[in-house]
Image: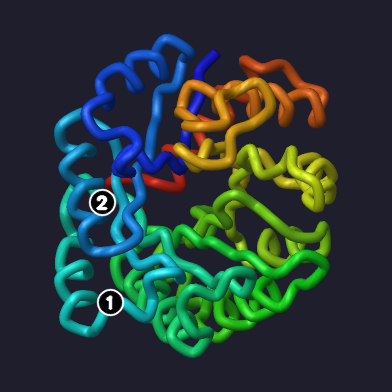
Amino acid sequence: MPLIDSHCHLNAERFTGDEDAVLERARAEGVERILVPGWNEASCRRALELAERFGLDGSIGVHPHDAANVDEVGWGRIAARAGEPAVVAIGETGLDYDRVFSPIPDQITNLRRNLGLALETGKPAILHVRSKAGRSDAQDAMVDELTAMGFGAQAAASAFGPDRPAAVIHSFSGSVDYARRVLDLGLAISISGLAFRSGEEATADVVTLVPLGQLLVETDSPFLSPPGAPRGRNEPEWVRITAAWVAERRRMGLDKLGGALVDTYDRTFSRHPA
C-alpha cells in the first residue's frame, strides 16, 4: 500500500545518526513521501539538509512556541530560503493557546508573516493549532486570521489556483464545525496519532467528512505515537496505523486510500505550483 507522512520531524535530535535506518523502515512499509518541517532557524536548516541528502521534501517557518525567539533578522534568513527546490511548504507555524510558550501577540505576528510568505511563494502553510481542553479560541483565531489574509478568497486562488490547498491543518485537533470551516476555506486536514487521545474524539467524525482531495495523514514524529507504536520515539513507518484507522472509518480499502493520499500530497506540496 502506498503511504505518505506529511509531517515528520526527522530533523529532531532523537533521530540524529539514525536517519538512514528510520527511512529504510518507512520505505519497507510503503511510505513514498515524507515532508520534514522546520520550526526555527536551526531546524529549518537541518530539514533542508536532510531533504537534499535523502530526496525528501522540506519546509521552512517558525512554530508558535518559537515566535518570541525569532527576530526580524532571523526571520529574514529563514524566508530567504523559501525559493529553494526542496522547500515545498511554509511552516510549521500556527497558534498554540494551550501551552503559550510565546505570548499570543507574538504568535499572531509570527503567523501573519508565515501566511504572507505562503501566499507570496505559492507554497502552502503548515498550521499547528491548539487550544486548552474544552476551548476553541486558537481555532477561532486561526480561521479569523486565514480569512483576513485572503485564504478561501482571491488572494489564495491567485497564488494556488482554484483546487490546490493553500494551507494544511497539521495534526488536526478540534470540532467538526471547525473542520467544516477550514475545509470551506479550501484547506487540507492532516490526521496524526493525536486522533487516538482522550479529548480528540471528534476527529473520528472529521475523517469521514473530509474530501479525499483535502485529506492527509502524518506521524508528527518523534511525537504523538499511535496505539501499537513505541511511545518513546514515533517514526514514519507507524503512519500505517493511522492510515488504517482512517480507512476503517471511511469504509474503504487501504490501497485505495493510500493512492488518494499520495495524489493529495503531490497536488498540495507540488514543487512546481500551478
Q: Quadrant of residue 24?
A: top left
Residue type, label 2: Val
Q: From this view, report whether residue 149 is shown above or below residue 38.
A: below
- Give the farthest residue toward the top: 28
Looking at the image, is mark 2 or mark 1 nearer the viewer?
Answer: 1
**Whether residue 78 can be seen here:** yes
Q: Quadrant of residue 12?
A: top left
Classed neighbour count for the residue bearing mark 2: other residues with Cα under 10 Å, few (<14), some (14–19), many (≥20)? many
- Find residue 244 and report its horizontal and vertical position in percent: 69, 22
Classed neighbour count for the residue bearing mark 1: other residues with Cα under 10 Å, few (<14), some (14–19), many (≥20)? some
Instruction: Describe residue 28's horizontal placement relative to residue 147 as left or right.
Output: left
- Find residue 184 and report its horizontal and vertical position in percent: 70, 64
Instruction: Describe residue 220's horizontal placement relative to residue 197 as left or right.
Output: left
Q: CA distance from mark 2 to mark 1?
A: 20 Å
Instruction: Describe residue 207's horizontal placement relative to residue 115 as left or right.
Output: right
Depth order, front residue of 154/242: 242
At horizontal 46% and vertical 28% (from top left) the residue drawn is 235
Circle on res. 70: 1
At horizontal 38% and vertical 34% (from top left) the residue drawn is 34
Q: From this view, report whether residue 100 is shown above or below residue 122.
A: below
- Find residue 263 and report its horizontal and vertical position in percent: 50, 33
Callout 1: SS: loop
Q: From this view, report whether residue 72 is shown above or below residue 7.
A: below
Of the numbered discs 2 and 1, the one sitting upstream in the chain is: 1
At horizontal 58% and vertical 52% (from top left) the residue drawn is 188
Residue type, label 1: Val
* Residue underneath mark 2: 87
Q: From this view, report whether residue 62 is shown above or below residue 153.
A: above
